[in-house]
Image: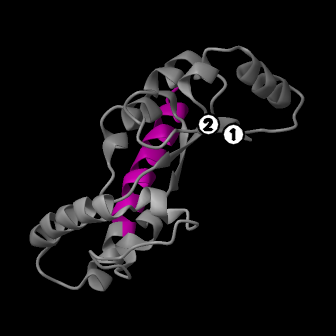
Amino acid sequence: MQLHSPDLEKFKCDEPWEALEILKSDGENVREGWSVQSFKETEQPHILDMQSDLIDKIQVRYNLLERKTEEVLLPKVLEYCTCVIVRILLLFGLLTGKFQRKTKFSPDNHRNMNLSPEKISDYFQLLEKVQIYLGIIPMIVWLPRVCVFVFLILLDIRLFQVQKIQSR
């Protein structure tokens, strides 16, 4: 069970936390957590400080081009031995190489909001920098390496957490 991308105001109320605590104590849910609101990764780590005994996992937007999570939230995850569920790893398909700079989505497509023409342009600028860093190779060649890179970061975090728990 997890709270899905609530506004920060909702976190100030006791009700969501009390509900999670009841579900956890009743044995209904073993792992409780929350899905960090998109683009708020640097604004919400204090929630983990306040509720670290209750939060077992977080779900966070994290991929090659969106790495704000590394700044503040991942250190908190390490500190509290919190599990991480990565979402939007392939950035709505953009990191698969399927889209071009001129790609547009219909108004009823959820990617229309997250991959507006302006955002696609910004992401392609970032991708060009990444391709220069990785060498000019086709995206399909380096994409699996990106997924492995993200997996290794998360695996490293998990191994650190296991070592920390074992040393208690």
Total residue callouts: 2
| Residue 42 x %, y % | 37, 32
Nearest the viewer among 159 and 55 is 55
Q: CA distance from mark 1 to mark 2?
A: 5 Å
* Type of amino acid at the residue the image marks with label 2: Trp
Q: Is residue 100 left or right of residue 29?
A: left
Q: Position of residue 168 (x, y in %)?
A: 53, 25
Task: Label the magenta part by its dominant secondary structure.
Answer: helix
Magenta region, residue range: 147-168
Instruction: Please report contact status of discs 1 and 2: CB closer than 8 Å, yes or no.
Output: yes
Q: Residue at x 63, y 35 (%)?
A: 56
Lower sequence index among marks 1 and 2: 1
Amino acid at dot 1 = Gln
User: Which of the 4 image quadrants contains residue 39?
Assistant: top left
Q: Secondary structure at mark 1?
A: strand
Q: Residue drawn at (48%, 38%), measured in percent from left and top?
A: 161
Residues packed near mark 1 inside 10 Å, few (<14), some (14 to 19) or many (20 plus): some
Q: Is residue 20 above or below residue 116?
A: above
Residue 119 position in % (x across, y down): 31, 58
Residue 117 as seen in the image, left or right of residue 7: left
Q: Quadrant of residue 122?
A: bottom left
| Mark 1, residue position | 2
Q: Is residue 131 above or below residue 3?
A: below
Image-quadrant location for residue 115: bottom left
Q: Position of residue 11 (x, y in %)?
A: 61, 21
Q: Is residue 30 magenta?
A: no
Task: Using the image, determine if residue 157 lies above or below residue 118.
Answer: above
Nearest to the observer: residue 163 or residue 117? 117
Location of the N terminus (image quadrant): top right
Q: Which residue is mark 2?
A: 34
**Is 33 placed above or below 128 here?**
above
